Image (cartoon, rainbow, N blue to C red):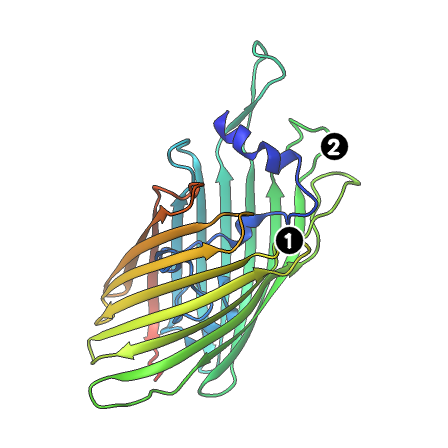
Amino acid sequence: MLIGLLFSGYLFAQDENKPALPFLNTPLDARASGMGDTGVATSTDVYSARWNPAKLVWIGNSSEFGIAYTPYLPKLTEDAALFGMNYVQRINDDSALSAGLTYFGFGEVVFRQTIDEQGKIVKPNDFWLDVAYSLQLNDQLSVGSGLRFINSNLKLTEAVQDARAANALAVDVGFYYRSDLNIREGADSRWRAGLSLSNFGTKISYDIDGDEQFLPSLLRFGLGHDFIFDFDSTLSVTLETNMLVVPVDNKALGFAIGSEYNFRDDLFLRLGYYHDTTNITDREYATVGAGLRKDDLKIDLSYLFTTSTIPSPFEGTLRIALSFEFGDRFYNF
């Protein structure tokens, strides 16, 4: 019942001036969420296509597979969660391909007209399928694009007779820059930059002959720097900004800063902070995260602390992600 009340305004009375499906921009992987939701200009991992498809070609292995799980509103329900998996395959030295699936289940919701009526149990959910391709243009620059099929079952026929499942198609495009190593005695360094446009596609409607809404198309830009102290340790810092590029009443800018300390590519410690410039979303939070690699297996964890007056739905949530590396190792100097 609490879940139904929480989402009732979103499921059945959406504002025409707000984009649909904001969960399309919800971070899936624990690494990015541990760094304040930064991902467009960070170094590459198996979930890169969801942030910036241009990053894929810099993947460290010939193939990688990842699986991630995030409980949603854990203080209110035990069966609402975000689940996803992603696979990346190098085609050759200059190109890579990825495929992914994401499922967002909001748990069981009971609908009834009166208190004595036998309730109907329904399970609102979203899922989307992704494919993406990345091409390296030279030693420093790569480009990428992706296609996404979206299916949303949020406005349910049990509650509204003319409702239907909503479908949409969206594309992502991205650019990624990684400078050559700046070699200095005692500490090498490298610059990174990324630009991406995600979820740019068709409108979506939950009603037969009803109003259509925009997808939450998001423009992201990021700049990062790697401080390479020695062969064992690296500190990476990334600044990113994002903005919705669909018609809304208030154009919000989001700012994020994230950092990652990498020790021998086996131990990772992360910090981050995210802030929105408007109260439309009122997203302000700090994040912490960690990662551990053992041979070809890597596990990442992250945790979020709300700093705004409105708690984040991921407050008190421990995100977890696993990734597996296969095949040959690539060293992208």
Q: Is residue 1 above or below residue 325?
A: above
- Which dot, 2 or 1, sits closer to the camera? 1
Q: Amino acid at mark 1?
A: Leu
Label disc, if present, on residue 87 of the rendered structure:
none
Q: Which residue is mark 1?
A: 215
Question: Do residues under tags 2 and 1 come within 8 Å of each other at their CB atoms?
Answer: no
* Rendered residue at 41%/31% (across/down): 76
* Rendered residue at 65%/34% (across/down): 12
Tell me residue 171's x, y (percent): 62, 63
Q: Amino acid at mark 2?
A: Asp
Residue farthest along the top direction in this orientation: 116
Tell me residue 71's x, y (percent): 39, 42
Q: Is residue 178 above or below residue 55?
A: below
* Rendered residue at 48%/88% (across/down): 138
Spatial CA span between label 2 and label 1: 21 Å
- To which quarter of the image does residue 300 belong? bottom left
Instruction: Tell me which label, 2 or 1, sits earlier in the chain.
Output: 2
Q: Is residue 268 left or right of residue 149?
A: left
How packed mark 2 is, by other alpha carbons closer than 10 Å (few <14, some 14-19, many 20 or more), is some
How packed mark 1 is, by other alpha carbons closer than 10 Å (few <14, some 14-19, many 20 or more), is many
Tell me residue 168's x, y (percent): 66, 52
Q: Which residue is mark 2?
A: 162
Q: Is residue 300 visible?
A: no
Q: Nearer the viewer, residue 223 or 298?
A: 223
Residue farthest along the right direction in this orientation: 209
Q: Is residue 25 visible?
A: yes
- Pick the quarter of the image with the C terminus: bottom left
Q: Is residue 215 left or right of residue 63?
A: right
Secondary structure state at the residue bearing disc 1: loop
